Amino acid sequence: MIRLTELRLPLGHDRAALEQAIVTRLGIAPDALEEVRIFRRGHDARRRGRIMLVYTVDCRVRDADAVLAAHADAPNITATPDTRYRFGIENGADLASRPGYSRPVVIGAGPCGLMAALVMAQMGLRPIIVERGKVVRERTVDTFALWRKSILNPESNVQFGEGGAGTFSDGKLYSQVSDPRHYGRKVLEEFVRAGAPEEILYISHPHVGTFRLVSMVEHIRAEIEALGGEYHFGAHVDELLVATHDGVRRVEGVRLTNGDVIESTHVILAIGHSARDTFTSLHASGVAMEAKPFSIGVRIEHPQSVIDVARYGTRTPDPLLGAADYRLVHHASNGRAVYSFCMCPGGTVVAATSEEGQVVTNGMSQYSRAERNANAGIVVGVSPQVDYPGGPLAGIAFQRHWERQAFLAGGGRYFAPAQTVGDFLVGRPSTSLGDVTPSYRPGVTPTDLSACLPDFAITALREALPAFDRKLAEFAMNDAVMTGVETRTSSPLRIPRGADGQSINTRGLYPAGEGAGYAGGILSAGIDGIRMAEAVALSLAGRPVDG
Ligand code: FAD
């Protein structure tokens, strides 16, 4: 097959126009084009009245070698790369049947743990998954209890339970991580097999929405179990069992809060960024970790129509484009970066705390992205050197402090503090809200958000909002609503690992995914899960990791 990139066609074109563009680009006769597969479709909306679709396509053509040779110098015409996934080992089932075989354990059933377990199960390695939360349907009930009745279950919520943090989300499935082995393609293909729409394989910024994610997670569980994997729910890992022989620390298993021990020489740690108790326990047991930067800020809501008009020049975007999104960055004069995070078109702001007496915001949407408001985190970078010196766990203390302030400012019952952009910019507490109705549940309290943000963040946000308004019309409109606080943008710490995937001071421990600082989002977490599954498989097979 031949791959063509950067094929640009106007919105609304038909299939014949695409084929004609291919034929013209390749300089071939129309009947030499035998098959066309769209590999990627994005769009360029920089000129609002003239939105272009941008394609990458794979084509089967007559005399392909000659056509490729004729375009040897054209950067947009190449042979289609082979992106098929190949397992790192072929003899997993043999290994797993040997006497004394120690089944790998995966802690956490988020996207990282699920993909790690799925790939290990497909290799025949019969992994064991331990997840502190509940199966996804029961977890959904607990999550809604916070949103509807102000009842938080600290073990079963937006952050914890089958499916991990991304289950109640917009389900955006793109990432900018380097992925030379095309593991991202494997993740997306598995998601399609589990029920995601096929389009996620070729749309440049796909999303699946929250409802679909729930059933996808169940499908993946069924496959893992069918392949000999084993799940333990309500299985909260309290302690990593480590023994030191000849000066080398090695994992021997995990102990659960109920006292049960699961022995294993290979443990993938995929606990996400909110498992603060587990980070504390790992630190106490001597696992190497270090503080890392993350961000703090607020969620902002505008009418989706305002964003659609600003981006596309219309309140009714073409269905191929869907509700408009945005990405914004501003470098403030106090040295802080301010940027939009996890933008959810046509979605809702959700209560995302996992600890009692704290308020955390995040965003989600359904596949249709048809809710009235657009929302996004608008967050300010923080770093351990400047903002929370004091060791690997200091970022957690920083997060907890501001989440508690948000809870207090919201007046309790997990209500979020809210302020209009107009009031925030002039430093006036909001006593009521305007035309934009906030979507956060169980509710919001109009107030002064500066009580729950550090001073440098307030200064940076006051500078950034008007700057964003110059890039995206009406962004700083008076009635846009901000709720806070957004603190769980990424993990506040990193658990370093070597090239073989293992913790730098604890053999057999494979820190993975967002919590360990190796991913940021569903897709990159899934990719990292595959990487660690491969690393475990190679170690079990006694083969070196080839980088
Ligand atoms: P997690 O998904 O956090 O999974 C960790 C799992 O480990 C959890 O299930 C947890 O219960 C379990 N666990 C923790 N500690 C223990 C323990 N001690 N014992 C046993 N189990 C334990 N990303 C996107 O790419 N697109 C989006 O649209 C998007 N929207 C989001 C919306 C919301 C509301 C939230 C909260 C996050 C969103 N994210 C989104 C981020 C995304 O969810 C995370 O980046 C991703 O889930 C990280 O995957 P992970 O597997 O590394 O960790």
Image: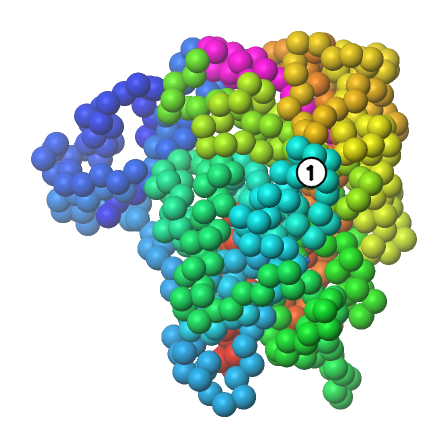
Q: In this figure, which residue is indicated by the disc labeled 1? A: 146
Q: Residue 418 location in percent, x, y?
A: 77, 22
Closer to us: 206 or 368: 368
Mark 1 CB lies closer than 8 A to ligand 1: no
Secondary structure beneath label 1? helix
Q: Residue 285 location in percent, x, y?
A: 80, 70
Residue drawn 49% across the image and 27% down it: 369
- The furthest residue to the left: 31
Q: Which residues are magenta?
A: 295-315
Is residue 392 among what the camera can see? yes
* Left or right: residue 266 compared with residue 353: left
Q: Residue 120 location in percent, x, y?
A: 47, 68
Is residue 468 among what the camera can see? no
Residue drawn 40% across the image and 40% down it: 200
* Left or right: residue 496 compared with residue 181: right
Give the class, few, some or many, for how many residues have Cα within 10 Å of label 1's Cα (few <14, many ≥20). Answer: many
* Left or right: residue 266 compared with residue 378: left
Q: Is residue 16 above or below residue 62?
A: above
Residue drawn 54% across the image and 31% down it: 365
Does the stretch in magenta take in 122?
no
Q: Residue 264 location in percent, x, y?
A: 61, 78
Q: How is the image coloured?
A: rainbow
| Number of marks | 1
Q: Is residue 343 above or below residue 245?
A: above
Does the stretch in magenta take in 310?
yes
* Residue 403, picture quadrant: top right
Name the residue type under label 1. Answer: Leu
Residue drawn 80% across the image and 60% down it: 280
